[in-house]
């Protein structure tokens, strides 16, 4: 079986690593890939948004299954393009990927079908948004409607901050066209938990829980990033929480999408807030999280190809989805200055230390090959993941492995998984 993976980050590296474990797979390609993915796949210089070129490549190479890792191509309709050409592809169609592609759509869906979420209003006019803020309760959350690399969310504590945020999103277009529409949402408090799930249009099978750390600095300070680290499982995601979410959030979301004529096949990532009033949906994503995939996939026992195919074929109810009874922690090694300004092209040393070490992984996010070596090529450079019998052991192992790798402007948070101590 030949598999093509579309994407170039740590998530796609984790997917490629997992796909390579399947006895059904003979050959893996990745477009465009990165220096780490090359260990498992032949990387092809085709961009993730070059749909026609990707489809032509899939036909030329006789690809049996294409896996879309990134949000941009999913929201842009790559699945529709592949299906129209008779190609087998894992991921939601364009009309289903709107679950992530439009905050306003997802909030309206939750309101219509009674799925627990924060109260909100949507705006396409900046003046109307500013007028609404005059009587809104603070703090308040502003969200760019479209895709913004996980950074289009502003938490505002004062009216002045909120007004500046409206200007930033809707007038200055800091997040581009993602800010043409904006959602203003009540501020919720509680523990954040991420739950990724496989979906086949009607059946949903949640994976193990995880928790991301979005802020750049220790103690959740600094700017929002694509994610500085994560751990799995979350000790706050109890059996009681799981039971509630399955009944009132997970299955109702799948049923709502089907009822709207947008059957969802692929992965729904549920960003949850565990509030005093029960779990509520913060956001949906339409693909694996990054870096959540780097802690969830190492714990997954089931052959991922079997799951992908069941999601496409509508037979997910026949799959026994199993995870190891252990824990995993991922610490992101970034370039100092991320997510604003940072240097690229710096040599990375120590990657060979992971060879042959069971339970330790290094997933490449922003790397490139230069001559005989591997250099930094992005803000988030590597995801260092380790497993352990429990969360504290996994965290200790991950921070031990962080020291094996070096590059000139290496930066990481020292407190990934600190919440574990409060559980």
Image (spheres, grey):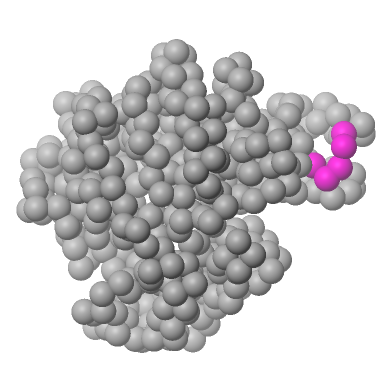
Give residue 209's position: percent from left, percent from top: 46, 50
**Relative horizontal placement of residue 163, taking residue 359 as reference (left or right):** right
Residue found at the far front of this picture: 240
* Quadrant in which the C terminus is drawn: bottom right
x and y, in percent, of residue 315 in the image:
22, 27
Q: Which SS does the magenta portion mostly show?
A: loop
The reply, left or right, for residue 105 in relation to residue 91 is right
Residue at 55% over, 75% down:
412
Q: Position of residue 8 (x, y in %)?
A: 35, 57
* Residue at x 31% of width, y 64% of height: 34
Q: Is residue 182 left or right of residue 376?
A: right
Check if residue 307 falls in the magenta segment: no
Where, quadrant-wise, is the N terminus in this rendering?
Answer: top left
Q: Which residues are magenta?
A: 136-140
Residue 368, given in percent of the width and then of the height, sits at 33, 71
Asked whether 139 falls inside the magenta stretch, the response is yes
Q: How many numbered discs sit on the rendered protein?
A: 0
Judge whether 103 appears above or below 109 on screen.
Answer: below
């Amino acid at each position: 079986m030949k598999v093509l993976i579309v994407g170039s980050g740590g998530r796609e590296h984790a997917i490629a690593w997992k796909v390579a474990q399947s006895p059904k797979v003979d050959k893996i390609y990745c477009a465009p890939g990165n220096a780490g993915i090359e260990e498992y796949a032949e990387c092809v210089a085709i961009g993730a948004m070059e749909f026609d070129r990707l489809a032509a490549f899939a036909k030329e190479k006789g690809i049996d299954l294409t896996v879309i890792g990134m949000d941009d191509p999913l929201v842009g309709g790559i699945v529709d393009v592949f299906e129209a050409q008779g190609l087998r592809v894992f991921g939601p169609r364009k009309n289903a990927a709107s679950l992530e592609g439009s905050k306003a759509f997802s909030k309206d869906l939750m309101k219509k079908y009674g799925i627990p979420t924060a109260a909100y209003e949507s705006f396409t006019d900046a003046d109307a948004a500013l007028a609404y803020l005059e009587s809104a309760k603070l703090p308040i959350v502003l969200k760019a409607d479209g895709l913004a690399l996980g950074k289009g969310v502003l938490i505002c504590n004062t009216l002045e901050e909120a007004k500046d945020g409206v200007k930033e999103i809707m007038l200055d277009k800091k997040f581009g066209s993602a800010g043409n529409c904006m959602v203003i949402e009540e501020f919720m408090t509680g523990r954040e938990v991420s739950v990724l799930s496989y979906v086949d249009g009607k059946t949903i099978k949640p994976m193990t829980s995880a928790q991301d750390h979005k802020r750049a600095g220790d103690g959740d300070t600094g700017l929002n990033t694509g994610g500085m680290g994560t751990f799995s499982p979350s000790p706050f995601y109890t059996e009681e929480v799981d039971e509630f979410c399955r009944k009132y959030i997970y299955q109702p979301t799948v049923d709502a999408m089907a009822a709207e004529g947008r059957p969802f096949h692929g992965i729904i990532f549920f960003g949850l807030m565990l509030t005093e009033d029960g779990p509520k949906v913060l956001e949906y994503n339409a693909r694996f999280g990054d870096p959540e995939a780097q802690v969830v996939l190492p714990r997954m026992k089931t052959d991922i190809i079997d799951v992908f195919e069941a999601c496409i074929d509508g037979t997910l109810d026949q799959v026994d989805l199993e995870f190891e009874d252990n824990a995993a922690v991922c610490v992101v090694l970034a370039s100092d200055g991320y997510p604003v300004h940072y240097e690229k092209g710096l040599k990375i040393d120590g990657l060979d230390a992971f060879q042959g070490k069971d339970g330790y992984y290094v997933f490449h996010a922003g790397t490139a090959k230069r001559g005989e070596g591997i250099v930094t090529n992005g803000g988030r450079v590597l995801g260092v993941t380790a497993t352990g019998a429990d969360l504290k052991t996994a965290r200790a192992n991950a921070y031990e492995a962080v020291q094996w790798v070096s590059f000139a402007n290496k930066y990481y948070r020292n407190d990934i998984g600190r919440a574990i101590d409060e559980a």
